Amino acid sequence: MTAEAARAAGKTRLRLLDYTYTFLHQHSVDGTPAMWPLSWVHPEEEGTVSIESQYYYGPSILVSPVVMENSTSVDIYVPKATFYDFFTLDVVNGTGSTVTINDVGYDTMPLHIRGGAVIPLRTGEAMTVNENRQLPFHLVIAPNATGTAEGYLRLDDGISTDVGDAYSDIYFSFDGSEMKVSGNFGYDKENALDMIVFAGQTANKTISIDGQQAEYITFDSEHQTLTAYNLGTKLKAMTVTLQ
């Protein structure tokens, strides 16, 4: 069981590696915290002040670990905001109250994406950091209650202390129907883009990139996701449109 849990944790860690690298880079630049207590993100909700076990991993991933030994359920506080289950992208509409999550496996923990975020992941399986960097990107757009989302991705070689101009600072901005990808694209390696997933979608739509409709699109009505896949492009300046 311990080995199984370690493998699952390692897989999730690698999926979030670019997200993690980005917020740690931001911390090195301006001191932005790498981890946040709920009360910092939701100061208007008094109940968050006393919560010690839950926290934000970076700006957008809510972590709610099971802390009771041998337990497969956990009571978590869900703030008044839109969230998405990290593994299924199911919508969770928070009401500022405590809910019980049952049947939590020993090899996982509840993770939720806070609405309003664009999360860069990787498509495929990897066992090491180097293997992970060879995988194409997989963008998850998780809109908030107003239907908007934004995000930031830092790319460089991950090793050099001085990368010169060989880095990318990539910004994502989604207004509910159009996502713009902009920024500096000086790092031109390991940045293939394979998939774009829009969460919280209640109807099937087309997805176009710079006016060209994506050939492969799937709509999952159960999990409310709309996905363009097999994109075969690079992560570059572009406009992605829902119609």
Image (cartoon, rainbow, N blue to C red):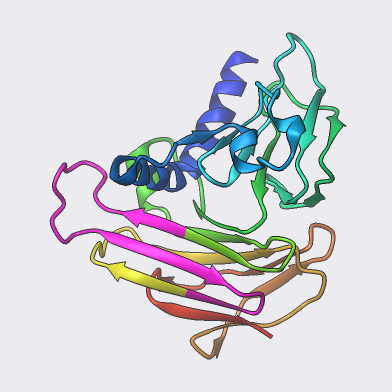
Image side of residue 52 versus residue 172, left or right: right
Q: Residue at x 74, y 62 (%)?
A: 145
How far across and how far down the image is residue 162, in percent? 13, 47
Asked if residue 173 is positioned above or below residue 178 in the image, the reply reads above
Q: Quadrant of the N terminus?
A: top right
Q: Quadrant of the C terminus?
A: bottom right
Q: Is residue 169 magenta?
A: yes
Q: In the displayed structure, would residue 85 be above or below residue 110? A: below
Front residue of 183 and 199: 183
Direction from residue 14 to residue 149 in the image, left or right: right
- Indicate whether 107 appears above or below 39: above
Q: Residue at x 32, y 42 (%)?
A: 130
User: Which residue lies at the image location 63% right of the left edge and 59% below the top edge?
Assistant: 116
What residue lies at 48% left-to-right and 67% top-to-bottom? Answer: 172
* Image quadrant in which you'd find residue 159: top left
Q: Going by the image, does 10 lie left or right of 21?
A: right
Magenta residues span 152-180
> Could you say which is closer to the camera, residue 232 or residue 175?
175
Q: Is residue 56 magenta?
A: no
Pinpoint residue 82: horizontal percent, then vertical percent.
74, 53
To which quarter of the image does residue 160 belong?
A: top left
